[in-house]
Image (cartoon, rainbow, N blue to C red):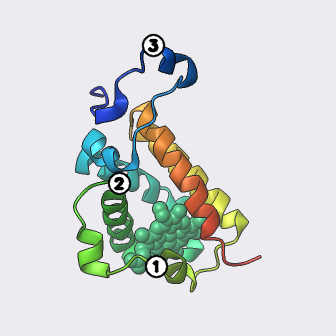
Amino acid sequence: MPPCTAQNCAPKKGADARRIKICIVDDQDVFAAIGEEGFERLVAASYRQVPGDEVLSQLYPKDDLAGAEQRLRDFLIFRFGGPPRYIEQRGHPRLRMRHAPFAVDSTARDHWMLLMGRAMEEAGLPDEVKQTLAAYFESSAAAMINRQ
Ligand code: HEM
């Protein structure tokens, strides 16, 4: 895995080093750090696990998993500083609204987070990118819960 190339990812020096112990990549620099290919590996590794997951396999469209994979990949690429293909093809994300037809409860959220966590390991992403993505997934997955 090449070193992270995000602009603000140089180790902090001097006084900063005491206050900031970990290097966090700005959201908009993630695409520069892992590229199209990194997002492809990540999302493919996550969706590969869906058919074997007893909760998520009931939610995702069995006949269009490849389409669902592409939608998440394009969304993440756009969200983290890459080309806006998702917006061009799907318009405004409105993710909470788009998830409304699917019963996302805290169990589904936990499964989604587990699969994505494993996918981040499998995709071999740099630690600082994993930290940035994990923080985003944590809060956005909580926001997607729409059932008790
Ligand atoms: C909390 C657990 C979650 C569950 C159970 C879940 C489930 C689903 C399901 C069933 C779909 C429909 C598949 C399709 O596109 O045909 C979907 C779509 C999508 N999800 Fe999630 N999701 C979750 C969290 C998230 C999070 C955290 C994000 C943001 C990173 C996200 C981003 C998307 C996107 C971009 C789409 C495609 C929307 C569209 O353009 O139609 N999801 N999700």
Residues under numbered marks 1 and 2 in contact, where contact means CB atoms less than 8 Å apart:
no
**Amino acid found under the numbered disc labelled 2:** Phe
Residue, disc 3: 14
Which of 148/119 is in front? 148
Which-is-in-front pick, marks 1 and 3? Answer: 3
Direction from residue 108 to residue 135 in the image, left or right? left
Q: Determine the residue located farthest toward the bottom in the rendered image.
A: 101
What secondary structure is marked by label 2? loop
Which of 13/114 is in front? 13
Residue 126 position in % (x across, y down): 39, 32
What secondary structure is marked by label 3? loop
Task: Specify which label sits upstream in the sequence, 1 or 3.
Answer: 3
Distance, label 1 to label 3, CA atoms, is 42 Å
Q: Is residue 96 above or below residue 38?
A: below
Residues under numbered marks 1 and 3 in contact, where contact means CB atoms less than 8 Å apart:
no
Q: Is residue 37 above or below residue 11?
A: below
Residue 55 position in % (x across, y down): 64, 67
Which of 126/42 is in front? 126
Residue 71 position in % (x across, y down): 35, 70
**Amino acid found under the numbered disc labelled 3:** Gly
Residue, disc 2: 80
